Image (cartoon, grey):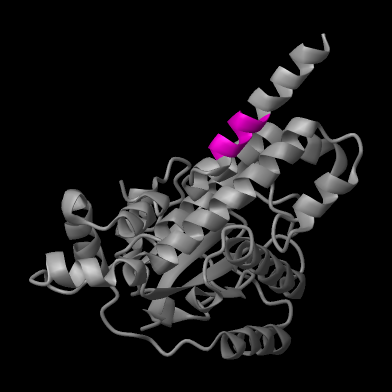
Amino acid sequence: MKRFWWMTLISMMAVSSGASSQTMSFEQAAVVLLNSCGKDIGKYCRNVNLGAGRMRSCLLQNAGVSAACKADWARVAVAVQKRAKARVTVLKVCEADALQLCGMVQKGDGQILDCMVAAQRGVSATCNQAITDAGYR
Amino acid sequence: MTCIQARAQATLTTTNLVDGLVGLETTPNIDVAVMRSVALERIKREGGQSAINRPPIAEMLYNLPQLTVEIQFNLNSAVINPVSYPTLGRVADALYHPVLSAYRVLVVGHTDSTGRREYNLSLSEKRATAIHEALVTTFRVPPQRILSVGLGEEQLQDREHPQAAVNRRVQIVTVGKIR
């Protein structure tokens, strides 16, 4: 029995770390929050707004809130942060690759990114990772 | 797209949002503090005048790229109902889209004419602020990308029917470039 619990714990950790290493769209993130925490929000945090960490604090402070909601909220926060960061920094991270591979492309953020996504094989690993984290492929 | 053509769509996709918000031709001179005080002064001046056919307070918004998004709030409150979280996420996705990433948007809150005019101005301001805050904090949209203002019942969509539900709305309007 003890061994079973350990295995469960390890597999849960693997699942959660796997999920938190991915980014997701902000809409997907919000859908996870709604599905996982909607009932608890209605029960414990009805008059609390989403922004400035208010809803997160309210959910964390209420003992009755489900563990799944708390865990999903934490996971989504990490994914959102990662994607937001990638979206803001992707052009900077990919600057050298863009000059080398897409120098002829007329300069517009969308066109440069399109070129970088198309040129995947010749693009550096860090730039490719930033493009993936930003959700552009 | 004019304000009159903008329609609330429950199934507005990120692509719809991006399409609606691109194409800013000339950058208007938008000062939200001025918009607020102009609205408040008009309310104080006109007092309890009928809302029917009330002229718009911020006509400069009409010719800018814009969309009406459906955000549910709790009754008489600025608390965003969780059913609208995905819509906020979609707005954030659109704002992060490469074709919009250099632009600044204005979140505009509106009410219908039910209730006191000054209260409506204040409620719409708080609601616009709640959306602004969620986009900037929960969805980490850079703060310099978003402005917000509440116009209460001073910019009705259906001016002949001031109490119509269509007047209760949130607009996202492209108002400038950040670089």
Residue at the outermost left position: A104
B148 or B86: nearer the viewer: B86
Q: Main secondary structure of the magenta part?
A: helix
Q: Which residue is depicted at the point 47% across and 86% down?
A: B30
B78 or A96: nearer the viewer: A96
Image: magenta residue range:
A13-19
Instruction: Residue B151: name its quadrant.
Output: bottom right
Q: Is residue A28 magenta?
A: no
Q: Is residue A15 magenta?
A: yes
Label total for image: 0
Q: Which residue is depicted at the point 26% across and 68% down?
A: A109
Instruction: Residue A7: name its quadrant.
Output: top right
Would residue A135 be seen by someone viewing this image from the given angle?
Answer: yes
**The C terminus of chain B: image quadrant:** bottom left
**The N terminus of chain B: image quadrant:** bottom left
Would residue B158 be seen by someone viewing this image from the given angle?
Answer: no
Question: Does residue A111 appear left or right of residue A6 in this picture?
Answer: left
Q: Position of residue B42 (x, y in %)?
A: 64, 86
Q: Position of residue A39 (x, y in %)?
A: 76, 32
Residue at the outermost top position: A1
Q: Which residue is depicted at the point 49% across and 60% down?
A: A84
Question: Does residue A21 appear left or right of residue B103 in this picture?
Answer: right
Question: Does residue A9 appear left or right of residue B64 in this picture?
Answer: right
Q: Position of residue B25 (x, y in %)?
A: 26, 79
Residue at the outermost right position: A63
A12 or A30: nearer the viewer: A12
Question: Does residue B94 appear left or right of residue A41 in this picture?
Answer: left
**Residue B130 higher or lower than A7, as above or below:** below
Instruction: Residue A68: name its quadrant.
Output: top right
Residue at the outermost front position: A3
B178 or A106: nearer the viewer: A106
